[in-house]
Amino acid sequence: MGAVKDVLRRPLGHFTERTLAGLALVLGAGVGFGLVLVLVRVQWSPLYDIDHGVAQWLNDRVSPIGPLVTVLNAITDLGGRAVIVWLVTVAVVGLLIRRQGRLAVFVIVTGAGALILDPALKTLVDRLRPEVTTPIGSYAGQSFPSGHALGSMVAYGALLLVFLPAMAPRWRKPAMVAVGVMVFLIGFTRVALGVHFLSDVIGAWLLGAAWLGVTAYAFRLWRLERGRPAAPLTEGLEPEAAHEVAPAPDEEKLLPHARAGIAEIIVGWVLVFGALYAFGTFVSYHAKGTFLATWDEVVPTWFAARQTPALNDLSWWWSKFGDTHAILLVSMIFCPLVLAIWRRWRPVLFVALTMFGELTLFLASAAAVDRPRPPVENLDGPMPTSSFPSGHIAATLCLWVAIAVIVFPRTDRWWRWLFVVSAVVMPVGVAVSRMYRGMHHPTDFMGAIMLTGLWIGLLYWVLRPNEDVHEGNQPTIESEDVDTLDDELAKAGRAD
């Protein structure tokens, strides 16, 4: 009889007993959103007055302060579709690599729901954006609900629930507070920038909370149906997966001698800057009569004489592989994959310091040398930095060489050579494009090579990014299993 009672109570009765308060909150959020939706739809006068008054009041105080507008735009971007899609995609791939198919399904369903609800409700309500005296924010589409506020509530909330078990108990409440503050700030920026009404943001928060609550409790019901206990949400969705969802659970210490390493990196940065400054000053102002000066004069002129509309377009696109957005995108995809596969922070630190050092060395050298651009037509127009060294080429070199350094010793599969090829082809393509467009001398390319070789060599010597490989660390998923990651999604729907 006891077994029969257990069967009858599970899963629905057991689920509702333990989650009654949570379900009440979810229903409350849903009812609250419905109320706001109705008031917006019927254009209730008191709400109309509050919305327009708050929008104009904030616009009057925010728009004259340029630095504040810049900060608000930076914060609001954290709730933009590009960032949210990147976060969800990286999380799903990482969870699949770690064999956490159920959690991957949760993230996909929760994120997809937000992507569907936002445009559907915007079309249904068809509310116009605020009209303020000084427009300072960019937007597209209708106003209700706020897509940034909805997306941030759902995406950051879902990721918090997934990765909460990986945190020490003392850090869980601060993490919840931090996510709450971030979601609030993103919503606030949408009103402060004059692109949404207050009710747009409040409605989005209520809808996001309701949808996140529905998917989270559905996940708990899913666990109960498979005989797993219903843990409190303060412990995350899958407490048993704490080790698997932790970014680098197998790494005890990042660096054996952190203080000495920091000192060596700082001293090395100064020495690399000195070498760049010396070489840049020589080729810019003291190399007359040498083959370097002849080279710097002949090559830009040769390219300028062979410019065509088709090559101009091709060079523009290839140059984009070396701009900040492309470099950042590749870095933000590669680093989470390294964490998911090899469970080590040191390779990620190596890539991060490589790119940070490249940026600071480039800016410092460009300002110190202050070299003019080649005396031909500069297809990209005036640039904020000087010619030596090439930032596009240096960034491309540093990124792809660092990736090759990390990947090559970590697998014996044939495709590791693709990263070596990329470390040559990508920088050469960017270099040819930048010189073709009249933006750099050949010695600027040499300066980028010098920067890359010296800086990556220094970091490799100090950080030892592949030390875990020599110690026997194995990837979470073997290279031959990469094509079967989608099987984890299929397994997620089956009983354990």
Image (tube, grey):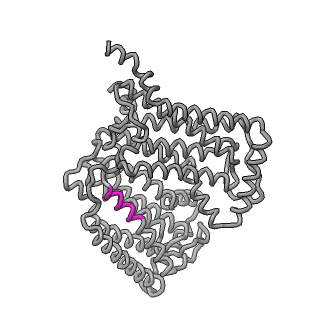
Prevalent SS, magenta region: helix
Residue closest to the eye, 151 or 32: 32
Q: Residue furthest right?
A: 45
Instruction: Classify 471 as above or below 13.
Output: below
Residue 5 in sight:
yes
Q: Nearer the viewer, residue 151 or 219?
A: 219
Which residue lies at the image location 41% right of the left edge and 64% below the top edge? 355
In the drawing, does residue 206 fall left or right of residue 441? right
The stretch in magenta equals 345-355
x then y, percent, for residue 98: 33, 41
Residue 164 counted in the magenta span: no
Position in image of residue 37 (x %, y %): 69, 36
Q: Position of residue 261 (x, y in %)?
A: 29, 70
Tell me if 403 is positioned left or right of 106 in this view.
left
Front position in the image: 228 or 154: 228
Residue 50 in the image: state x and y as whole percent.
75, 48
Residue at the spot 54% in from the left edge and 73% down from the top edge: 385
